[in-house]
Amino acid sequence: MKSRRRFIKNTSMICLGAGLVPNELFVSSASAATGAGELLTEARYYDKLAHRKIKCVLCPRECVIDDLERGYCGVRENRGGTYYTLVHSRPCTAHIDPIEKKPLFHFMPASMAFSIATVGCNVECKFCQNWQISQVRPEQIRNYDMPPEVIAEYAKEKKCKSIAYTYTEPVIFTEYMYDCAVAGNERDVASVMISNGYINPKPMKDLSKVLRAVKIDLKAFTEKFYRNLVAGELKPVLDTLVLLREMDIWTEIVYLVIPSHNDDPNELKQMCQWIVSELGADVPVHFTRFYPQYRLKNLPPTPISTLESTRKIAQDAGINFCYIGNVPQHGGENTYCPSCNKMLIKRRGYIILENNITGNRCANCQQEIPGIWS
Amino acid sequence: MTKSISRREFFLKSMITGSSAFFAKPDARAGILFPKNKVAAGRVVSIRDNSVRTSKNSLNPDVVENMLNTAMSAFFSVGSAAEAWAGLFSENDVVGIKVNCLAGRGMSTSQTLVDAIVKNLLAIGIPARQIIIWDRANDDLKRAGYKIQTSKRDVLCYGNDHAGYTRQLYESGSIGSFLSNILVHQCTAIINVPIMKDHGIVGITNALKNFFGAIHNPNKYHSFKGDPYIADVNLLPDIRNKVRLTICDALTSQYEGGPPYMPQWCWQHNGVIVAQDMVAMDSIAWNIIDGKRAEKGMPSLKEAGREPTYIRTAADADHKLGICEPNAIDLIEI
Ligand code: SF4
């Protein structure tokens, strides 16, 4: 059910001017004017239960929600036994970013991604970089009215090759993501999901039909870490990674290395071995540097030496494309041919300085390089 | 420990004791984080009066007021309710009345009870503009029948969505939240006025749980039956230091199907419960709800898999927010 008015107007322009963390945050009387109440789209993944309860089956949390209550993510509400998403067509932020910023290194290098997010998340990472928008509810922040057609049109107009669902957790705005991806595909604009992978198989399979690539944040390789620092679970994330491989969706993994929490060499080795055996050696893995954030401010940034030794563990385990991220100008952000070892893509931050991939092959040895290159 | 006295006995007794026990020093149950200006931890006064219902089954405001005044006098061991109120607040206080309106009409804090509280505050000289009836959102308040009032001509009434939240993130144990500006920046004192009812996830919602309405992200903290999150929220200094009184609306209560209003599981308890120790009050409320469930042939909250363990946690050595152990609670039933 859609009861929303569609304003196809210059909202996209307004939105692009807004920073990721708008100052309007928490000036609630103003934002209440655009409050969640009026703009409702029925959710797609839930079961109706007795006494006007519902069970959301979008993510493994599977919240059982009473009438007038919301699920854990805060962006879905039960109204009289019908479950609604409060964020369809209501992004809180949008930017044009290099695809390398996602990071996706094997997906249309040097292209731009029109990147959008709504508020909300289905976990609470103590180290979240975007907690000001991921950990709030729709009525607590200014949102914009941007239906899928507006998103897709704008992306096309600005020559973005993809729409990226990013910054917060796109799983919780899955209906909007799906509809934007369909609108984008109709205009030859691809869609990429930047996610924690905490999603149930059915919605993930549905999304796989419209997405071109996915980046998954694998936050650790222990349930303990997921329980204590993420308020989530590891197992469903691993299941999602396996499912993505089965669905043949281009996938890259990011692993944020947090000192003393998930940098144990043995755990890292086990994780890398799991990746190779379950997903294959060609899944790119980005080991990125942690900076103190949100509720994990008492730790130092990850030492670069830790990132380097982590990368070495991954290489030794047989992962072909291991990167170091969040460390500008580090050699670990370049792509090397697993066959001849020549540099394929030279990067500096998000800028591509050199690209030696022709078609989908190493220009030097003709080795096929996995990825979506154009 | 439970003492049952009739209203008549109570008045006779209070005439003798006068105000000698008013704001007695906290007793020897050392270590409980009990703010100043308080009666001993563990004291709870519960009053019930079936004549509170009119023939049309609505609440009789005079009886509600009378129940409140009697409970207040008994709780503070003073001769009159006015004396009790005057000892709690000064004219300079901005007093927030935290209600619970999420379930709309039928299962929200009764306006009749809130009116009686406001009347008492006005009577001790607190200007109307310094009284704020509040909950999470204007819509919640409206749904429960409250009239939003944001101009200072009258008693104020609005939600956090009107007042906004702090920009600072407050952390307490397991929780990290922005707090309602009403709690942090607008009020100097809070009266907590929850409604006693069943809660499908955390067991019961009453005094402690009501302060989930003061944080911006309550949706994040219902896992594990709200334990330890609810206790951690109540450990926040702005709650611990500002809440001077809890008056529980136990006029109509619900023993199953909460927090939404489910008339088939409601009963007319016809009660008002007064305490300063929210843990003790919740422990009593838990007992009442479990008692009702037993009477109706339903499993206990524990058997139903939602024992409100957060109440016990609130009393533990890490929180020390009050007394949970029923035998240690000084319950006076009128
Ligand atoms: S998507 Fe949101 S409401 Fe649904 S199960 Fe996940 S956290 Fe709960």
Image (cartoon, helix red, strand yellow):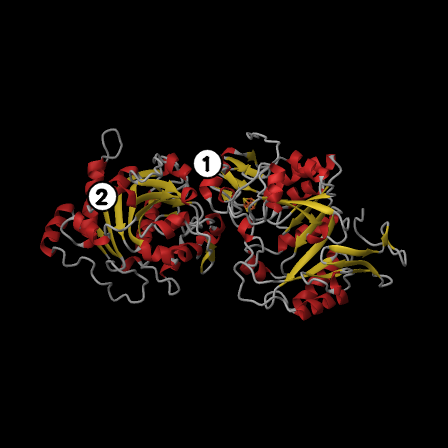
Q: Secondary structure at mark 2?
A: helix
- Whether residue B203 can be seen here: no
Do dots 1 and 2 share one subunit? no
Where residue A87 appears, as percent x and y from the top left, is 56, 39
Mark 1 crowdedness (10 Å alpha carbons): few <14, some 14-19, many ≥20: few
Q: Secondary structure at mark 1?
A: helix
Where residue B8 appears, as percent x and y from the top left, is 12, 46
Left or right, A259 with respect to A333, comes to left
- Which residue occupies 54% across, 55% down? A231
Give the residue type at disc 2. Answer: Leu
Where residue A239 appears, as percent x and y from the top left, is 66, 52
The residue tagged 2 is B122
Mark in front: 1 vs 2: 2
Instruction: Provide the chain ID for the residue under circle 1.
Output: A
Instruction: Provide the chain ID for the residue under circle 2.
Output: B
Left or right, A116 with respect to B28, comes to right
Q: How many marks?
A: 2
> Regarding ligand 1, which quadrant of the image does it lie in?
top right
The residue tagged 1 is A51
Give the residue type at disc 1. Answer: His
What is the spatial separation of the Cα atoms under label 1 and label 2, in whole angstroms? 41 Å
Please tell me which residue lies in front, A2 or B49.
Answer: A2
Image disc number at residue A104: none
Query: In the displayed structure, would residue A195 be above or below residue A342?
Result: above
